[in-house]
Amino acid sequence: MSQQSFHRTIFKNTGLFGFSQVLRIVMRLITNKVAAIFIGAAGIGLIGLIENILNLIKGITDLGIPSSSVREVAIISTKNEEDEKEKRLLQILYKWSWISGIIGVLITLLFSKKISVSVFENDNFRIEIIFLSLYFLFSSVASIRLSVLRGKKKVTTIVLHQIILVVISTFIAIPFYYYFGIRGIIPVFVATSFANFLLSLFFTRRIKVSNSKLTFSEFLNELLPVFKLGMLLSINVVFGQICFYIIRWFLKESDSIDVLGIYQVSNTFLVSYLGLIFAAMANDYYPRLCNYEKNEEKFNNLINDQTELALLLVVPSILILYLVIPYIIPILYTAEFILVLKILHIGLFSVVLKAIIWPIGYISLVKNDKLMYFKQNVIGDFMNVILSVLLFHYLNLKGLGIALVIMFVISGFYTFYGVNTKYKFKYRKDTQQVLLVSIVLGILAILSISFNDFSIKNPFLIITMLVSVIYSGIHLKKKIYRNS
């Protein structure tokens, strides 16, 4: 496969996933507007806190196997789709998903009172937390089955699953927030996870799985290769969620739960809205990179092409958002959320840095270098919590945005140094040019807002945005259609 065809393939699959992600955002905008009206900033802050705890428990119970299984399935499925080894692997993964889900249920039941107190500051929601335990059973089964689809690169199936799920989720959330307010939050989590569970069963029903007898010792021995990588991924997830919990706890305790809501909205823009590009790419990029692990030229070309495409899509999106965000926040939420601009002023630039770091971050994971992948993630999470707490203390909300940028700079240098030293990875000259232009445009946007504030009438920001759109358009056309 030539360098040019990588661009075309990446763009095509990103477009497919991107469509589902755009629809997801539209549906989420509707849900967030309803949430902002009926549960307010405090309620949105509670949603973020509950998500944090759910991800923490899930990280402990699934042992990172949903993520590590993508690599194992991708490697096996390239050999023979009907291979008995693959069927056996799927049999083991499916059994594990039920075991993991049951463990999650038991942990939630055991700590239901403490979870209620940590989130709602009383134990009046203990019954709801017990009901929430079902989330882990449904989400565990769904996450493993979706990992199998990713590993087998079932692009169309994954997109269809995402589209149906996001529509169902929206129709679940709106009436619950409307009728029950804050007490509707937990039922939304459970009902959405159940819908995800049913859809995952439906879309994987035709994938053949071994029905051979499986003893407990065989189950453990054959799960071990997936477990070894998954365990470190699990520790990464748990550590990251603990760091996010510390940040959220600090914001709530040092200021108010309303500030927690502002922080949650900033994450929604930085992770959910702008993150749609990364989410769209991840479904195709990671399993495809696994396929080229032994081919150094194709491996490096794919990483360079992915980096270029990520930046060419991300930078114009950020600059357009800089122009319109002060006008859309009151529409998407309410006027009380306008303070999120203080975080996003500099925080949006972190997404540019993420587009640079994100593709090379997968290298150690694909190479099965567990320790290196573990360290690069731990460094990022550790810096995030230290910088966020410290800079919020001195600079308030603006400090949270600065913390993100500094964190990505430090973790980015560390990650690149590691893959360059150990795996001899280098950026091509054309990729270096895209990197430089993207960073310069991002810095110019920050400076233009510093002197003229957020405004669609900001002439410097308009010029920067137009340059970015034109630059990206020309390069995308050249790279995607060259030699076509």
Image: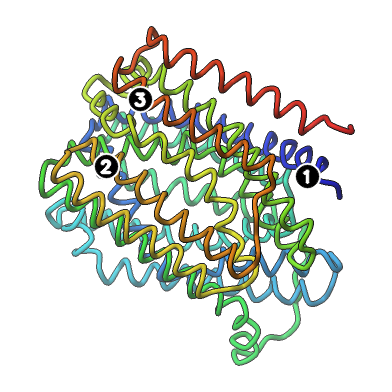
Q: Nearer the viewer, residue 227 or 203?
A: 227
Q: Secondary structure at mark 1?
A: helix
Residue situated furthest top in the rendering = 457
Can you identify the residue that label 3 sits on? 447
Q: Position of residue 144 (x, y in %)?
A: 59, 63
Residue 182 lies, with reference to residue 460, above or below; the image says: below
Within-10-Å neighbours for mark 2: few <14, some 14–19, many 20+ = many
Q: In which quadrant is the C terminus drawn? A: top right
Residue toward you, 236 or 367: 367
Find residue 314 and report its image quarter. Answer: top right
Question: Residue 336 got which mark?
Answer: none
Answer with left or right where residue 380 lies relative to residue 179: right
Q: Which residue is mark 2?
A: 400
Q: Amino acid at mark 3?
A: Leu
Q: Amino acid at mark 1?
A: Phe
Judging by the rendered image, the residue that carries numbered circle 1 is: 6
Q: Nearer the viewer, residue 245 or 476?
A: 476
**Label 3, label 1: how far apart the Cα atoms are:** 35 Å
Instruction: Give me the residue at 17% from left, 52% from top.
Output: 250
**Dot 3 or dot 2, earlier in sequence:** 2
Vertical arrangement, residue 177 with respect to residue 458, above or below: below
In the image, 140: left or right of 294?
left
Farthest residue to the front: give it.
Answer: 429
Q: What secondary structure is found at the residue carrying circle 3?
A: helix
Identity, as a three-letter code, of the amino acid under mark 2: Leu
How crowded is the residue under tag 1: few (<14 C-alpha within 10 Å), some, or many (20+)? many
Q: Position of residue 417 (x, y in %)?
A: 52, 62
For marks 1 and 2, give the CA distance.
36 Å
Identify the secondary structure beneath mark 2: helix
